[in-house]
Amino acid sequence: MSFFDSLTRRQLFDGTKDSMLGLALTYLLSQESRAKGAEKVQSHGGIHHRPKAKKVIQLFMNGGVSQMDTFDYKPELIRRHGQKETFGLKTAVTSAPGALMKCPFEWKRHGECGRWVSSVFPHMAKQVDDLGFLMAMKSKTNVHGPASYLQNTGFLLPGFPCLGAWISFAMGTLNKNLPDFIVFPDQRGLPYNNAGNFTSGFLPKDHQGTVIYPDRKNPIPLLHPPAAVKEITRDSEREGLHLLNRLNKLHLKTTAPDSRLKSRMESFALAAQMQLHAPEAFDVSSESQATHEAYGLNKKTTQYFGRSCLLARRLIERGVRFVQVWSGAGSATGNWDNHGDIPKELPAIAGQVDQPISALLNDLKQRGLLEDTLVVWTTEFGRMPFTQGSVGRDHNGGTFLSWLAGAGIQGGTAHGESDPFSFKAQTGVTTGYDLNATILHLLGINHEKLTFNQGGVERRLTDVHGHVVHEILN
């Protein structure tokens, strides 16, 4: 040990970080640490009150979904199509306001609730009796980066924990063999802010989202040693990790508490469990052909998002607390940021998610998983009622919408309304703070009491805002 005593921890980590020592059989590490915040969860299943939900699937449509072309039916906008109305704006976010533009798609009422849905969502339209809509959401900004941070973390600036991290921190694990918080990005890349949308911020790092690309040969990077490296064996991993664990424990005894080191040690333990259990969880070959077809795995347009949704169901089924599925990368194209051509761009991106989301809801319902699983569909802001260029739409933080389904949600309901042009939220106005407060409420958490002291400030997901939207709850 005299040689290792002469090494600093940084030197040791620099020498081993590219090996698989930290991802080997880590049974020597304490499994008690994987309980995380579970000791806070009372016998009734929640932290502050009895919960309706235990797990969450969040479907985030990156880029700003056009509300008046999907779920927000506006007859007045149809009647005034082509007229000039700028609502007092000399300029929009990235362009000069054009003429009013009606939705270019057909509208129909669906379900017993009679919810209007445009033809871009023929599959989701069949689910409206199970959905609770927030029809008049608004954002403080109409810029992608800050708006995405706001909807995910409750703040306009980076560095704050996201919803999934707060839930992991508060609720603890239901399955010590898999992460509490898993993220499936779009196949084209990460969203605006990159991994900042799934960060743990100032919370312990083991609560950040684990990013997985389901279409890759190795969806979890670095979980196993490269096949070409024959020198790394099960025994060598065990011995290396045993040494690393001893050195970490010695270091902790001689220094102040370090949450980063503790989180790293816990990630080693989780990685060892994942080596054994993740391959089964991510293997969809055991699913029936009917299930593959329902999620659209047999079609190029829906294959990737469909696989993400199917894996979300499999992970929720195995006790993962929070799964976030993204549609759209952080780029000028290939997402919901339809500046140029609503008639062409919106059906293309909607067609990638419509069937898989409907299949996910059906699957969860048939398996009884909706009884304790909450599904949330949202975006960062909406679009303008007037044109950008000839048939595009610019950003609009004035109004957008979200829907929820599953545990605790009264299906077929809607709260709030935008103005006749879908320019501004008008009645029953809600924000991302309210959405997150409602999600936490359904998990048995009072959003005002879930706090973390950061530099003397008691921080919370909803900052100093937010109220539970009881109008859509049962």
Image (cartoon, rainbow, N blue to C red):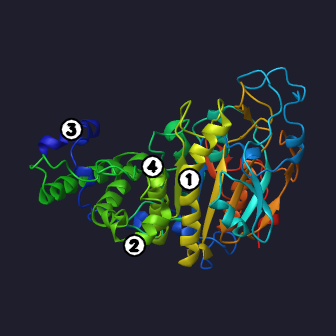
Kindly state the secondary structure of the residue where label 3 is placed. Answer: helix
The disc placed on residue 259 is: 4
Kindly state the secondary structure of the residue where label 2 is placed. Answer: loop
The residue to which callout 1 is attached is 353
Kindly state the secondary structure of the residue where label 4 is placed. Answer: helix
Q: Nearer the viewer, mark 4 or mark 2?
A: 2
User: CA separation, marks 2 and 3?
Assistant: 46 Å
The residue to which callout 3 is attached is 15
Q: Earlier in the sequence, mark 2 or mark 1?
A: 2
The one of 229 and 279 positioned closer to us in this rendering = 279
In the visual, does 422 lie left or right of 240?
right
**Residue 396 makes an appearance in the image:** yes
Q: Nearer the viewer, mark 4 or mark 3?
A: 3
Residue 97, quarter of picture: top right
Q: Amino acid at mark 4?
A: Ser
Are discs 1 and 3 less than 8 Å apart at CB? no
The disc placed on residue 288 is: 2
Residue 41 percent coordinates (x, y): 58, 71
Q: Residue furthest left?
A: 231
In the visual, does 85 lie left or right of 268?
right
Q: Earlier in the sequence, mark 4 or mark 1?
A: 4
Q: Amino acid at mark 2?
A: Ser
Q: Dot 3, crowdedness within 10 Å: few (<14), some or many (≥20)? A: few
In the visual, does 87 lie left or right of 357?
right
